[in-house]
Image (tube, grey):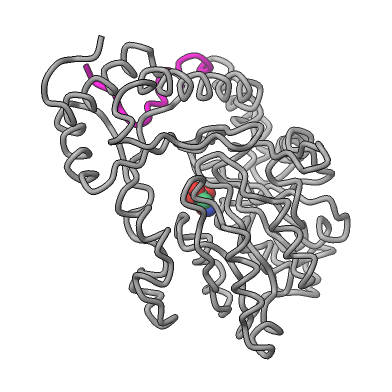
Amino acid sequence: MKVPLLDLTEQYNGIRDEVMSAVVELFDSQQFILGPKVMELENRVADYCGCRYAVGVSSGTDALLISLMAIGVSHGDMVITTPYTFFSTAGVIARLGALPVFVDIDDKTYNMDPAKLAETISSMKESDRARLKAIIPVHLFGQCADMEEIIRVGDLYDLPIIEDAAQAIGAEYQFEDGEVKRAGSMGKFGCFSFFPSKNLGGFGDGGMVTTNEESAYDFLKRMRVHGSEPKYYHSVVGGNFRLDALQAAVLLIKINFLDDWTEKRKNNAGYYRKLFGEVLTNEIELPLDKTVRHVYNQFIIKVGNRRDELKKFLNDNDIGCEIYYPVPLHMQSCFSYLGYRQDSFPVSAEAAMTTLALPVYPELTRQQMEYVVDRIYCFFKKDKKIS
Ligand SMILES: *Cc1c(COP(=O)(O)O)cnc(C)c1O
């Protein structure tokens, strides 16, 4: 049996006709740059995330970049994030000439540890603290970071929060007072990616920034067209950060299915839990489902010191699995100038060595999941199959 880590063909086949007619309609309209489709998608995503505004941009990376630009982050500033995330979360900070300041993660959720966030800021020299401009928590793998505490720290030091929600569209977080909010609606900005492997993926690159602030919204819209408003009059230097109308047309079809796909991801995660239920409890740690709505962009298991061996074994058995992420950002050679050591962020370093992503995409069948778990069981027990 073959079990790819992600296979988008079945999903595509189910919506092919709808997508094709939307694409043909767009081509016929010859409206390729921004326009009604982008605006319609912005409204849909804003609604979906429980935000007032959304701005379509060229990628998740550019969503983060333009948010930092809107805050005015520039040379010599500092921005806090975690070292256990996709590269671009920290890459955008460095690209603006600012310094990424890392805070280690929680070992169960892989998200920013709010206690360590508070400690990092409070132990900074006063002159460094003055250089801090923002905090970027990442809702990694589809689960919201501990926003209650992160917002508390942000408020204490008057630091805006930019949510990296690239992997978490539709994820929900419950505050102590019972209020439930969606990823991207809790900070000053929420940044989303429509990279094809995300839960809402386009047919190419794309992204979105959400916000509740009208002035920030106006600024983002200007920044995405080289800072011009009106056209050819530039009060600030922006860039070409536009979302293609073609991607918006495709995403407007796909967003209708997002909740159904998310439900299937959750069911798949639940089925893995059931299958792993009584077996391998010493060998494998299952992902913690802490927030009210984890959307499982990835299903991450922790396997200890035989992770690489297991990955090879599964790959040899036609099972796709991947390491997210093999090198924590504080150990990337491009960030060696920051002067961090391997053990500067021990939880991130350990996660990079012990975690493995298993297939969890919506169209996965029960038989495929049973096969995955059976193979993992064989790897550890080397004897009988689970029944
Ligand atoms: C995918 C991703 C990004 C970047 O999105 P792109 O659309 O690929 O530029 C940023 N942060 C995280 C956590 C991601 O997973």
Determine the residue positioned at 32% across, 11% down: 367
Q: Describe residue 375's horizontal placement relative to residue 39 as left or right.
A: left
Residue 119 visible, this angle: yes
Q: What number of labels is visible?
A: 0
Compared with 72, 155 (above or below) is: above
Residue 152 placed where, x, y %?
Answer: 76, 60
- 19 or 150, which lies in front? 150
Residue 337 placed where, x, y %?
Answer: 41, 83
Compared with 208, 95 (above or below) is: below
Tell me the quadrant of the picture where the C terminus can be found. top left
- 26 or 368, which lies in front? 368
**Magenta-drawn stretch contains 3:** yes
Tell me the quadrant of the picture where the N terminus can be found. top left
Q: Describe residue 361's horizontal placement relative to residue 245 as left or right.
A: left
**Magenta-drawn stretch contains 71:** no
- 123 or 340, which lies in front? 123
Q: Residue furthest right?
A: 214
Determine the residue positioned at 36% across, 70% down: 343
Q: Residue furthest bottom?
A: 127
Q: Describe residue 156's horizontal placement relative to residue 147 as left or right.
A: right
Determine the residue positioned at 37% across, 12% down: 366
Q: Describe residue 111's horizontal placement relative to residue 77 as left or right.
A: left
Residue 125 placed where, x, y %?
Answer: 63, 88
Residue 188 placed where, x, y %?
Answer: 77, 57
Compared with 230, 106 (above or below) is: above
Residue 11 visible, this angle: no
Write down the region rendered in magenta.
1-16
Determine the residue positioned at 84% across, 44% down: 52
